[in-house]
């Protein structure tokens, strides 16, 4: 229902306020609303803000936007401090502004000789009220000056215009604007903003299987798996490339019943390790580590080493079980039983997962919910602050909303990434109910137009949905990577790293791994999901590692690349060349990229100069972070990009006025 003063269309708002908007520490969140009333009297608005501690912050004074729109806004500057993490609330108070009305009407009427005495007396009465309402923090001289203006306005011996001039002097207006008379105050509904730590929005992820690092054949020809200890040897190289998050697939015991063999076959050999996503055996379940990887103490050492190198661990949370998981015997009610009495296997036609039982969250939600919460808290107690959640779209939304909220009540710094390659409605709803980040359709967006459309779509949803652009995953080897050669690996890395604040790489990308199990498939040949895959990292100069290092360095050095909604696409007269920029204050990064990995492209780039912080006639000194070369650019600029040499200009921009 509309109040005495109309306060409507609050933003940011998610599903009409049903869910909180999202922000991170250090972010400036623009809070806005439409505020108006009948007639011509002036209105104004403030924002009442409460932090995670429940304490009220000082008023945020809203300022009007484009005339005629009735939009008002105020910046909420979230302190860059862990104490800022958690739920913030805000409410808009719209109010009638009698002083503002008088400041507008009095000059018009008095200068026209209309109702002069009445207007001056109304001003005197307003200033009387204003003087009494001034807080004690206002200096005594200022308080006396306002009281003195009451006398001045009523002094018939002075010229009316002189009395008016004294009353509307800029210093007086500034003082009383800061301490207004607020009438007919009307409060809006309360809106919420959940504030996460900065890693929720920005970070470079690196995925690898610990069991492949250090894997080898022993003297008797038996396969020796890698361990947490051998995998630690890979961490310095990952840190040196500039990655922030080390993501590990499931580290738990792997089922022995229906274990999968190489390339997802049903006939494993005695040494085949099985899929890590087939979780659980007589060796333990979701709260255990696979004995071949080591002990929980070894895992703790792995986490500590990761932190020591300036990174953190993300752990896979896959809520499914192998047939021999302890849950399958101890809690059969947590699964779906078929008509023949057997438990249903997982399916995603035409794929079948004979080594996995999906969970049924409807038979005993209280018991299953409590057990999953226990598992999550077990791993947070061992230093895990990020969970990559496997297939969350196959579990109830209400479960995730409850689980994430329960975890964040006591550990607001814990983050959840949704691996949900599913329908847009489900992806967006998962973000709204609490998931910190989301996988996206980026993998399948390769053309210029669809890349622009998708980036702008995500930017428009940035107040609640944060994308993570993975260039590849153990499940997804896109056709472009299969047939584009080394140039396309650079192209996709540039897109992922410089379009999205968060992106990810699955190990082997640096080595240009690109062979699919069969034509038309997106599965890797000899997929690491089903077998050990030790790699030769001894010659990083012959891999994509230096290029990824350069991209991550540019990301770290330029705050403009830490945000999602500051992207601008520039006009290019070639369908194969894409140009975009990101700007935060004076920090500007401009990228021009040839999307075709098979041949050179020439084009003219027409820049939106104001988007770069420049006038239309300015000159720009642009420096390519790939080659180190500098160029003098203006509105229209010629480029030639050969993917076999370098497909992209990654340019920092300095405006020469």
Image: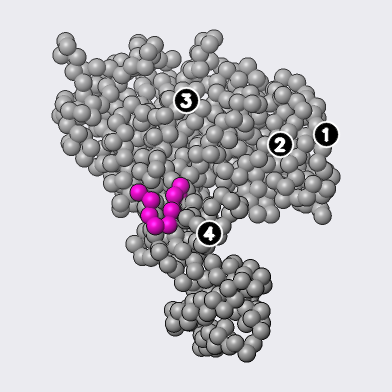
Q: Is residue 183 above or below residue 133?
A: above
Q: Which of marks 4 and 3 is in front?
A: 4
Image quadrant assignment for residue 279: top left
Sequence order check, earlier mark of 3 and 1: 3
Q: CA separation, marks 4 and 2?
A: 42 Å
Query: Over which residues does the magenta segment extend?
Result: 1-10
For numbered disc 2, what is the local secondary structure? strand
Q: Which of marks 2 and 3 is nearer the N terminus?
A: 3
Q: Residue 121: x and y, percent? A: 52, 79
Based on the picture, tell me whether residue 3 belongs to the magenta stretch: yes
* Residue at the disc numbered 2: 570
- Sequence-wise, the earlier of marks 2 and 1 is 2
Whether residue 439 is in magenta: the answer is: no
Query: How far, Cα to Cα, is label 3 from label 1?
Result: 39 Å
Front residue (pair 323, 488): 488
In front: label 4 or label 2 = 4
* Mark 3, secondary structure of its residue: loop
Q: Inspect this view and state whether residue 523 appears.
A: yes
* Crowd rating for badge 1 (residues with CA inside 10 Å; few <14, some 14–19, many 20+): few
Residue 480: percent from left, percent from top: 60, 20
Q: Is residue 636 left or right of residue 259?
A: right
Nearer the N terminus, badge 4 or badge 3?
Answer: 4
Contact? badges 2 and 3 (CB < 8 Å) = no
Question: Measuring 80% from the left and 27% from the top, which residue is drawn there?
Answer: 602
**Along the line of sight, the residue nearer the viewer: 167 or 140:** 167
Disc 2 or disc 3, which is closer to the eye? Answer: 2
CB-based contact (under 8 Å), mark 4 and mark 2: no
Instruction: Look at the numbered disc 4 and give the secondary structure of its residue.
Output: loop
């Amino acid at each position: 229902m509309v109040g005495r003063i109309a306060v409507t269309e609050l933003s940011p708002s998610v599903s009409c306020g049903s869910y909180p908007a999202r922000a991170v520490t250090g972010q400036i969140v623009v809070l806005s609303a439409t505020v108006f009333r009948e007639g011509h009297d002036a209105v104004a608005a403030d924002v009442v803000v409460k932090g995670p501690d429940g304490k009220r912050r000082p008023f945020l004074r809203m300022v009007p936007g484009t005339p005629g729109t009735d939009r008002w806004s105020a910046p909420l500057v979230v302190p860059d401090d862990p104490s800022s993490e958690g739920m913030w609330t805000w409410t808009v108070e719209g109010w009638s502004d009698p002083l503002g009305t008088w400041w507008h009407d009095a000059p018009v009427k008095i200068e026209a000789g209309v109702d002069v005495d009445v207007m001056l007396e109304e001003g005197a009465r307003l200033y009387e009220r204003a003087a009494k309402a001034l807080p004690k923090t206002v200096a005594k001289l200022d308080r006396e000056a306002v009281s003195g203006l009451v006398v001045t306005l009523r002094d018939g011996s002075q010229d009316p215009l002189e009395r008016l001039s004294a009353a509307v002097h800029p210093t007086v207006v500034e003082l009383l604007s800061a301490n207004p008379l607020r009438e007919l105050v009307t409060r809006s509904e309360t809106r919420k903003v959940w504030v996460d730590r900065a890693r929720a929005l920005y970070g470079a992820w690196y995925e690898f299987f610990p069991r492949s690092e250090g894997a080898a054949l022993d003297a008797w020809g038996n396969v020796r798996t890698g361990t947490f200890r051998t995998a630690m040897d890979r961490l310095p190289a990952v840190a040196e490339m500039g990655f922030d998050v080390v993501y590990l697939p499931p580290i738990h015991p792997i089922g022995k019943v229906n274990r999968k063999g190489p390339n997802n076959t049903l006939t494993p050999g005695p040494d085949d390790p099985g899929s890590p996503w087939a979780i659980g055996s007589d060796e333990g379940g979701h709260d255990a580590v696979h004995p071949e990887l080591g002990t929980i103490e070894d895992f703790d050492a792995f986490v500590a080493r990761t932190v020591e190198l300036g990174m953190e661990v993300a752990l896979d949370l896959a809520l499914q079980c192998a047939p021999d998981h302890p849950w399958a015997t101890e809690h059969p009610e947590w699964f779906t039983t078929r008509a023949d009495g057997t438990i249903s296997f997982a399916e995603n036609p035409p794929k079948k997962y004979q080594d996995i039982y999906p969970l049924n969250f409807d038979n005993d939600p209280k018991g299953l919910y409590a057990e999953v919460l226990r598992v999550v808290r077990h791993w947070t107690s061992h230093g895990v602050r990020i969970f990559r959640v496997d297939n969350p779209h196959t579990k109830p939304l209400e479960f995730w909303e409850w689980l994430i909220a329960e975890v964040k009540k006591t550990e607001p710094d814990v983050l959840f990434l949704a691996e949900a390659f599913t329908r847009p409605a489900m992806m967006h709803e998962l973000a709204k109910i609490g998931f910190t980040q989301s996988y996206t359709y980026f993998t399948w967006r390769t053309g210029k137009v669809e890349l622009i459309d998708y980036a702008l779509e995500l930017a428009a949803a940035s107040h609640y949905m944060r994308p993570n652009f993975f260039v590849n995953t153990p499940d997804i080897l896109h056709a472009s990577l299969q047939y584009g050669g080394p140039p396309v690996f650079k192209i996709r890395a540039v897109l992922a790293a410089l379009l999205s604040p968060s992106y990810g790489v699955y190990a082997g990308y640096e080595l240009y791994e690109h062979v699919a199990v069969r034509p038309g498939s997106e599965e890797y040949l000899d997929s690491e999901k089903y077998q050990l895959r030790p790699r030769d990292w001894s010659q990083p100069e012959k891999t994509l590692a230096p290029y990824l290092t350069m991209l991550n360095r540019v990301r770290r050095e330029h705050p403009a690349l830490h945000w999602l909604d500051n992207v601008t696409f520039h006009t290019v007269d070639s369908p194969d060349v894409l140009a975009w920029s990101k700007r935060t204050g004076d920090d500007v990064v401009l990228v021009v990229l040839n999307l075709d990995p098979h041949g050179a492209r020439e084009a003219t780039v027409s820049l939106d100069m104001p988007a770069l912080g420049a006038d239309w006639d300015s000159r720009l000194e642009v420096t390519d972070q790939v080659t180190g070369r500098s160029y003098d650019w203006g509105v229209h600029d010629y480029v030639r990009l050969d993917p076999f040499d370098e497909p992209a200009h990654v340019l920092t921009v300095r405006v020469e006025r």
